[in-house]
Structure formats: structure tokens, C-alpha cells
Image (tube, coloured by chain):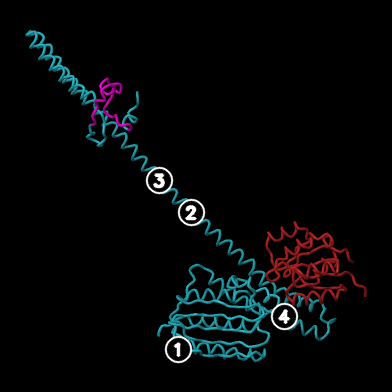
Chain colours: A cyan, B red
Amino acid sequence: MKNKSETIETGYAGCLNQNCWLVKNLGYAPYRRCQYCDFKFRNCLFLHYQIVSAILIVLSFSAFLLVEGKLSVLAIISIFVLVIVYGYFFNKSTEKIVQANFAQRKAKETLEKFNEKLKDMVDEQTKDIQDKAEHLGKLLKMRSEFLDIASHQLRTPTSVIKGTLAMMKEGDMEKMSTEEKAHFVEGMFQKSVKLESIINDILVASEMDTADFDIKVDDQIELDQFLEKEVKDHQFDAEEKKIALSFEKLSSGPFKIKGNAKYLEQVVDNLLSNALKYTPQGLIKATIKNDKDSAIIAISDTGIGIPKEDLERIFNKFIRGKNACDAYTDGSGLGLFIIKRVMDRHIGSKVWVESEEGKGSTFYLQFPLIET
Amino acid sequence: MSVKAKVLFIEDDPDQIFLYQTKFKLEGYDFISAKNRLNGVKMALEERPNLILLDVLLGNENGIDILRDLKTNKEIKNIPVMVFTNFDKEDTVHQAMSLGAVDYVIKSKVVPSEIVQRVAGILKIK
């Protein structure tokens, strides 16, 4: 015999007699609905009682009509009453079983739902923890890489300064020619300048390297005047290198933008300094023009350019073009990274570069205008 | 004064080259240098130095790749290579030593006279 829960699920909740002759032979087992759970079941014995009662009534009346005996009528009536009572109590017990089965089923369903909910919650929290651990791992890796490279960048000029001073201390300078001595002094000076520049860049870059780095961009800047001033500030360096540095307005404006003047000054300064650094001879042009509702600054040079393979990652931290490293320049590899981070914080603005190795580079800065 | 030994420095920073070249020459060594992987291996093959000082970060090139080139070339694999860099990372140190470097020295932690002494020690020069 099937247990109760199986009975419920197979749809025979009320029928305890699965081998019922009527069900098996006549297929007589019409469905009833359970009053508790709306579950369809066959209450065949209850129905049997009705059928058997009906047959007995017919038989008793037939017998009465046939024999006209009082005893037989009483016997038939007794049987009839017994069947009714039996059927009534059987039906009641069936209902109790159904009710118990229903309660069990409900409890099971509730437990399953709870389990499912609990599992979902655990899965969700596990995923959340995994995501956080992964993110933390990435941050730690980035921090470690940053420290490795930053410490290398800082140690390089330090080791030259320290090495030169050690040689002076040990009396090696006396054995050197005047040119060699001058070279060492110049080398130490350049390395100390580089050291200062790297320290500044690292401080700025590490500040920018946090997810919550934000800058106020509410200064109203006349971009054409701003660029012209920056170009003027670099004229002296350009003249010293015998490089022609020019400024040109390619359209009439307006060029008013909203931004952070301090950081944008650093952006333009980095671009002009890079252009001067990587242009051994030729010219550097700084232009400004309108493009629909934006202003575009272009700083182009006839310098060493950027190799194709370095173009994609040129705005990453500590990345310098291969040819820039080969040429004797003192870049920290952070200038373009700083530019990119500052431009990213100016909504609607962008920076990009077009370059050809050996021919020169053009860096573009695009800003949305506040007045058109 | 006879030359004690020939040292090849694979390094991309001209100031570093000038510094160690001056010191090694003052100490009686023949000192040559190469700025990248290609020239480094080429000079090692042509010049057959007694020892190679090798930087790790040479622009976009990795000194470990250069070390691998040097140590997989039958003709020059026996030349002792001392990694001489400011890049201080444990993984890189292990990598360099397992590839056959004789030492891994951080430039900023030594002065030129110390590096000359270490080279002399490796080459057993008095």
C-alpha cells in the first residue's frame, strides 16, 4: 500500500481501496474536490456506499413485492441503515486522512520554499563575498605593481646620485678629467630634478588611482586664452631647444567651458612638456577650434612619435613608448596617465592621440562648451 | 696597467652607464655597454665579456627575457650574469636565479666600489 504523501501526489487521496472492484472493472470513480486543498481525489468507497445502497433498496423493494414477508423488509432496512452509517463514518475518516495529508503537504511545501529561499540567500551572499574578494585581490595586485614600479622609478635617480657622491667621497673624482667631473655634476642635477618630478607625479597619480577620486569642475574657463597662456609659459624652453612653438585659433569661438583650472593646467603643461621633450627638432603647434557644441585643442609635434604597438596603452601608468625610453629623456611614465584621469573626471570630455613613429604625434582634448 | 676583465653592462639609462663605466675603468676593467636586448646578446657573442651586468627594466624590454636568451645560447651560456637593477620583486629574483644568474643586486643599495668588489669576487680577481 502506498504511503499517505504518495497517495496525495498521485491523486487518489480519498480512495483507500485502490483495488476496488468498481474502479478496476467499471472504471467508476468520478473525481471529487478536496475541501481543504482543492485537490482532486476519488472517494470510491463513499460512492460505493451510495451505489450499494441504491442496489439494496431496489433489491429490498423487489423482495418485499415478491415475498411480502415482514422479516425480510426489516433485514433489508437494517442493512440499508448500516450501510449509511458505515459510509458516513468512512467518509469522515477519509476526510481526516486528507486533512492530515494536506497539512503534511503544506508543511513540506513551506519547508521546501524556506530551503530554497535560504539557498538563494546563501548563494547570493557567497557570490557577493567572492566578488568582493576578487575586487580586493585586483586592488592589492594593482597596489603591489604600483609600488614595484614606483620604487624602481624612485631608486633609479637615487642610485646615480648616491653612486656619484660615493665616488666623490672615496676620492675617485680626483682621478677624473674636468669633462667627466662636469658630466657627473650635471647628471646628479638632472637626476635630482627627475626625482622631484617623479615624487610629484607619484603623489598625484596615487591620489587619482583611487576609485573615489573626484575633482570639482566648476571653474569657468575661456579655453583659448587658457591655452595661449600655457603656450607662452613654454616659449622659453622651446627657444632653448630651438623648437618653433606656436598657438593658433582655428575658429572664432566661443570657447567657454566648465572645468578644474588647476588640473587642466597640469594636463596642457604635460602635453606641451612631452611635445618639447620628444621633439629633437622641428615645430610644435597648439591649436583650438570649435566642433559643434565642443571645443577641441590639438597639440601636434614633429617629434619621435609613438610606435603603433604602444599607442593603445600609452595612457596607462608607467608606460612610455619604446622609442621614448631609447631616447634619453627623463619621463616617469605617469604624465599621460594623469591626463587621462583628469579628462575622465570632466564629464563629456575626452583625450586621444594620433601618431606615427618617426613623424610626430598629435594629442587632442575635447570639451563640451557651456555657451554655444 | 693591464685590463683585469671585460664587463658588459646591459642598461638603458645613460647616467647609470656613465657612472659604472667611469668606476670600472678607474679600477682597471674594460667596460662595454648595450642598451637593449638585441644589442646585448649581439655584444655578448661578439665581445665575449668575462661578466655581464644586466638591468631588468629596459624601457619596454624585460631583462629576464635577455637573461633567458643569454643562458640558452650555447656559445655564451657560461658567462656569469649578475642582475643589477633597481627592480626589487621577489618573483623576479627567483626567476633570475633559477635561470642561472650568479647574483641579484639592487643598485640603490650598493655604491660603485661595492659592485666592483662583487664582480672581482665572482671573477676571483684580487
Q: Residue at x 75, y 83 (%)?
A: A185
In the image, taking residue B105 as reference, residue A104 lies left or right, namely left
Q: Regarding mark 4 in the picture, which secondary structure is present there?
A: helix
Mark 4 and mark 3: span between their CA atoms?
A: 67 Å
Q: Quadrant of the N terminus of chain A?
A: top left
Label pair 3/2, CB-CB below 8 angstroms: no
Q: Regarding mark 2 in the picture, which secondary structure is present there?
A: helix
What is the three-letter code of the residue carrying label 1?
Answer: Gly
Residue A309 rendering spot, x and y as whole percentages = 63, 70
N-terminal label among 4 and 3: 3
Residue nearer the viewer, A154 or A353: A353
Residue A70 rendering spot, x and y as whole percentages = 7, 9
N-terminal label among 2 and 4: 2
Which residue position holds label 4?
A188
Q: Residue at x 84, y 61 (%)?
A: B75
N-terminal label among 1 and 3: 3
Mark 1 and mark 3: span between their CA atoms?
A: 63 Å
Residue nearer the viewer, A311 or B118: A311
* Residue A129: mark in rendering: 2
